[in-house]
Every structure is written in C-alpha cells, then in structure tokens.
Amino acid sequence: MRIGVLCSGGDAPGMNPALRSIVRTACTLGDDVYGIKHGWEGILDEEFYTNDDGSFVMGLRSVSGLSKIGGTILHSSRSKRFRTPEGVENAAKILKKHKFDALIPIGGNGTLSGAVELGKVWDGQIIGLPGTIDNDLYGSDFTIGFATAVDSAVDCVDKLRDTAGSHDLMFFVEVMGRHCGDIALSTAIASGAEIACIPEAEEPPERLVKRLKKIKEAGKTSVIAIVAEGDESGGAVAMQQILKEAGNPFDSRAVVLGHVLRGGSPVAADRILASELGNFAVSAILHGETGKMAGKISNELVLTPLEDCVSKHRKVDAEQLRLLHIVAS
C-alpha cells in the first residue's frame, strides 16, 4: 500500500513524532510512506520528501531522531488553490497519478476540512490526525501539540511573574486560541494566574475590575491575566485598555506570546500521543477505514467521522473553570 503524509496549516510540536510513528509502523507492516511537503499545496506542486540518496519512500532512517524535534520536516503551508473546487479536483488527479492508496493529513480544523472535500472526489482512504496546539477539535480529548504549547506558555508566565512582583504590575498575557480557550485556561491554572479570559466564558469588564479591586484590597501587589486571542475583548492589548478605562487599580502591561507557543521540542505527553495516533492511523487504514480522524477519548483510541470533527466543537472543561476560580481566589 502507498500512503501519503502531509502537515498543513499551523505547525504543532509533535508533528514529527507522529510522522516517525507512521513511517515505522508502515515499514513494519510492509507498506510504503511518501512525505508530501508543504501540505495541500505540496500535492498540487507534486513536491515530495526526498531522502539523502534521492529516493522518495521514507524508511526507518528517514525519521531517525525525530521525536525531540519541533516543527515538521515535511514543512507546512496554507493553500489558497486547494480551497477551490478546481484545486481539490486537481489534487485528486495528482494523487491518482502517483498511485496513492491512502493519505494521512496532520493538522487542525482547516486541514481536516480540506480532507473532507478531498474525500468527495478521491476514492483513496483518508485518516486525519489532530495536529494543532489549540486543542479545539471534536473527537479527541487532546490534540498533538497542546501539552507543549501550555508548557511553553507557563514557562513564559513564570518569568513574567518575577517582573510583575518586582514592579507591582499586572500583566495581560495573550496566548493562541481563536475559538477554544483551553490553552489560556490550562496555562492560568498551571501558572497560578488570577484571571483567564476565554471565548467560552465571557465576563463583563466591570465585574473583572471589581475582582481586581478585591485582589488589591487583600494586599496583593501583582496580577497575571491570561487572555485567549479569541476572547470577546479582542486580545490582551484590547483587554488592557478596556479594563484601564473601567477603573483597573493596577498599572499594567500587555504581552502577546503568539507563535512562540508553536515552537520547541515536544514534551513527553505530545510525543506519546503523536506516536499512539500515528500507529493507530496506519492500523485504521489497513483495516479499511476512511473519512475519519484518529483521536483519544477517555484514554481510548477512537475514530471520529471527519465531518463531525470540523462541524462540532470541543467545550472547555467546566470543572477546570470552577477550579481556576477557587485556586485564584
């Protein structure tokens, strides 16, 4: 069997370990894996990963040492051409031309949405992997890259806490998460932040200021607020200004972590999840599955229809929200 693998959209720590697992599982079972560079754009450009000896089939040594490397050796991109019906049709023709039997796209909502469209015009098998730091895909408790992103954010916040304490400041720290506040919520709990502003739990500025005044009255001289980029305020900079105008009692600064959270060596949790899902994806293909995403729910490996993964949304854990209010009080 000829299996293609690509990474599309924003990169996530753990994409390389996932590729390693896919290649080594396929090699063990006697199947061939071809890496497609630059995501969906790479299919249209017929751009394939090439080994040092000029061959295209990825072998055991092709993925040696990848577990600890961030980013993706296949490179990633966003393809405007693939978003058109003509682009999807052309991609299907190219996959047929190169005799691909199956495809494993690794990415987030946009990547898997593209997989849904491709599945309508291509008769090969498609099993997606949830590769995004946002942890916003329905069909898996955690996405590949999320744990590392939170770990990176917490490390940054710990450093900011030192400066906040030294200068009696409040820091508004923006993290990624346009539609899901999981990074912000987990970072807030792990770093001991006093406030988390996320899309799923709107809080009026007046109420936040009231909380901040109580915090200051209690004798606290510095505060950390974690703000998801998709929060209703419009992000950390906007939130800083809104609360200043509403009477924030603390002098404040805004810091946007942004793309920093996508980089770095994947933590153990992401390496393990990526390895499990990569192996599971190849196994699912060999069992005839298609049009699904490999995920892990309640510690069980599961397959979820791609249509559900892109049309439904994960909800943040209500218990974590409750926990934040308790430990930050």
Image (spheres, rainbow, N blue to C red):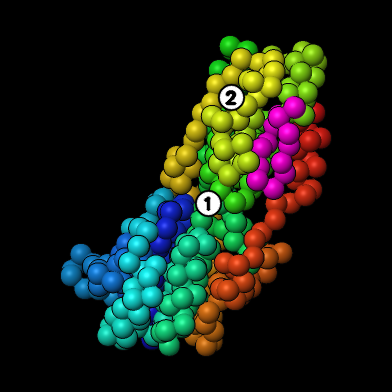
- Residue 93 seen anywhere in this rendered image of the structure: yes
Residue where numbered disc 1 is placed? 133
Query: Does residue 193 appear left or right of residue 56 in this picture?
Result: right
Q: Is residue 7 above or below residue 240?
A: below
Q: Quadrant location of residue 175?
A: top right
Residue 16 x %, y %:
41, 59
Q: Which residues are magenta?
A: 194-206
Query: Which mark is on residue 241?
Result: 2
Please name the amino acid that badge 2 sits on: Gln
Secondary structure at numbered mark 1: loop
Residue drawn at the location 52% of the way across and 62% of the way down:
109
Q: Callout 1: 10 Å neighbours few (<14), some, many (20+)?
A: many
Q: Is residue 9 left or right of residue 288?
A: left
Query: Predominant secondary structure in magenta?
Result: loop
Query: Which numbered tag is attached to residue 12?
Result: none
- Label 1 amino acid? Ile
